[in-house]
Amino acid sequence: MALKKLTLSVDEDVIRKAKGYSQRHETSLSKLVSDFLSKLVDSEGTRTPVVSRLRGILPRDVAVEEYRRYLERKHR
């Protein structure tokens, strides 16, 4: 598989946390992002089972920012 560069814009705090995570798990950010993206859809563009299981977990009336704040509090 040929590798290509990808430029992403990510919040500084997210980058800091991701770098810490990657160091603790002895991997690179590139590998983490690649692994994550590969789990979103299969080669035919169909959602993978992992993504399908996650879909619909949150009620529709939950605001994204509200959920992010919840996750930040939970994982501090």
Image (spheres, grey):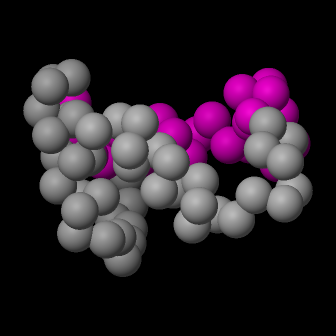
Q: Is residue 73 left or right of residue 38?
A: left
Percent position of residue 41, x then y: 74, 43
Determine if residue 42 is in view. no
Q: Is residue 37 above or below residue 5?
A: above
40 with respect to 58 (left or right) = left
Give the camera-side residue of 56 and 28.
56
Membership of 34 in magenta stretch: yes
The reply, left or right, for residue 15 in relation to residue 54 is left
Tell me which residue sits at (22%, 35%) in the image: 21
Residue 44 location, x and y as percent?
Answer: 84, 43
Q: Please state the horizontal and vertical placement of residue 30, each as a whole percent of the image.
A: 30, 48
Q: Is residue 57 above or below residue 8?
A: above
The magenta segment? 27-55
Viewer-closest of 31 and 64: 64
Residue depicted at 57% across the width and 66% down the height: 65
Q: Give residue 16's position: percent from left, percent from top.
A: 17, 55
Residue visible at 41% across and 36% down?
74
Which one is nearer the viewer's eye here, 72 or 17? Answer: 72
